[in-house]
Amino acid sequence: MTPRPASPVRQRAEAMSGGPSLVKGPLQGYHHETYVLWPPGGPGPVKLREPRSTSLWFDRRCFRSEEELLRGLKGRIDRVPDVIDIEGMGLQTFIEGRTLGAHRWWWGRRVPDAVFEQIVAVFRQTVPITAGTLDVERRCSPRDAPEDGDTGGFLKRLVVFIEEQVYAANRAEFGGLYEALGVREESLVRLEKSVAGLTGRPFCLLHADLHRENFILDPRGGLWTIDWELAMVGDPLYDLATHLYLMRYPVDQEYRMIREWCEAVEAIRPGSSRGWKRDLRLLTDFKRAQSVYTDTVRAAMSLHDETGFRWAALPRVAGKLQDVLTAAAGPLGLEYVPGRREIMTALVHRHRAYAGPAAGRSGRARR
C-alpha cells in the first residue's frame, strides 16, 4: 500500500527542524494539527500548529494571537509557554510533562493538594490583569465589548454568539437534529431569561478553558497552564464556573475551590466574588446549555470517519448526548428529554439525510 503523503503542516515542520527524525506528532488535539520539532540551534523543542480545516469552532475568541497574548503574560503568570521567533513565526515552547488528564487524576477524581494550590494561584494571578493593563491586540471591536463590571452584558454576548455562530450558522445541516432533540429556536430565548440578573463584578483576564488537559505537570511538580486561545476579558466568576464545570471535582474539592477562589480574588480586587452564591449557579446553567449546542454537532460528526458511519459507537454517543440534554433541560426549558433510543434514531436520520459526499462534510462555524 502506498503511504499517504505528509500533510503540508508536517512538511513545514520537517523543513524547519532539519529532517523527519526531529519531528514528533501529530499530537492529539481537536482544533489543531500540532507537531513538536527541534529547530537547529534553537533553545529546545517548540510546537508548530495550524487549525484543522475540518474543525468546528464553537467558542468566542477575544485576542487576535495566542502567541502575542503569551508574550504579554510573561512575568505575570507563572509557568506559561515562552514564544520563540523562528523563520518569522512565533512558536510556543513545548512543555515536557503530562497533562492532569493523562495522570491518574482523571475526570471526577481528586486533585493532589500541591496541584490544587497551584491552580488557585493561576486565578490569583489572572485577577489583577485587566483590559487596561494588557497591551495585546483584540479581535472584538470596542463597541462589542461590555463596560467593565457589566456581567449581564458579558453573558448576553456569549448567548448571542451561540445563537449566531453555532446554532444559526449550522442550522442548515443540523437544524433537523436539534429539532428532533427538542432544542428549538425559542430555547435560546429561554436561556437568556433564565441566566439574567447577574451581580456586577470587576472584569479581569479569563483563561476560559481551564480543564485537566490544559494543565501540564512537569517532572519537578510544577503546573503549567497552556492553550490560552479562548482567553478573554470579562466576569471573573465565569472563569470559575467554567473551571468547575470542566474539571468535575469531587464535591468536597469543589467546595474547597469555591472557598479558596473567593478568598484569593477578594484579597486582590474586592468585589470579584460578589453575588457568587446565586450567580455561580446561573453561569453553570449557561455552560450546561452551551454544551447542548456544541455537543450535538460534535456527536453527529464523531460518528463519521474515513470508513463510514461508526455504528458500534452509536449507543455510547447517544448516551452521552442524553446526559448533556438532561443537565440543560432547566435553563433551556426543555419539556421532554428524549431517551437514548430516540437520540440514536435522530442521529441515524441525520446521517441518512447527509449520506454520500455530504455525510463527510464537517462544516465550520464562522468565527
Image (cartoon, rainbow, N blue to C red):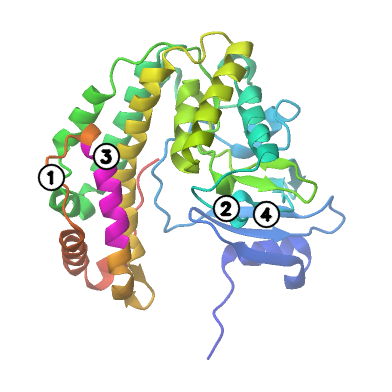
Quadrant assignment for the C terminus: top left
Q: Which mark is residue 101?
A: 2
The local secondary structure at tag 3 comes to helix
Q: Earlier in the sequence, mark 1 or mark 4?
A: 4
Alpha carbons under labels 3 and 2: distance apart: 25 Å
Alpha carbons under labels 3 and 1: distance apart: 11 Å
Residue 320: which quarter of the image?
bottom left
The local secondary structure at tag 4 comes to strand
Q: Earlier in the sequence, mark 3 or mark 2?
A: 2
- Which residues lie in the magenta part? 317-329
The residue pinned by badge 3 equals: 328
The residue pinned by badge 1 equals: 336
The type of residue carrying mark 3 is: Ala
Q: Is residue 72 visible to us here?
A: yes
Question: Circles 3 and 2: CB distance less than 8 Å?
Answer: no
* Image x and y of residue 177, in percent: 18, 54
Residue neighbourhood size for the residue with mark 1, other residues' Cα within 10 Å, grouped as few (<14), some (14–19), many (≥20): few
Closer-to-camera residue (272/208): 272
* Image x and y of residue 77, in percent: 70, 29
Q: Which mark is residue 98?
A: 4
Q: Earlier in the sequence, mark 4 or mark 3?
A: 4
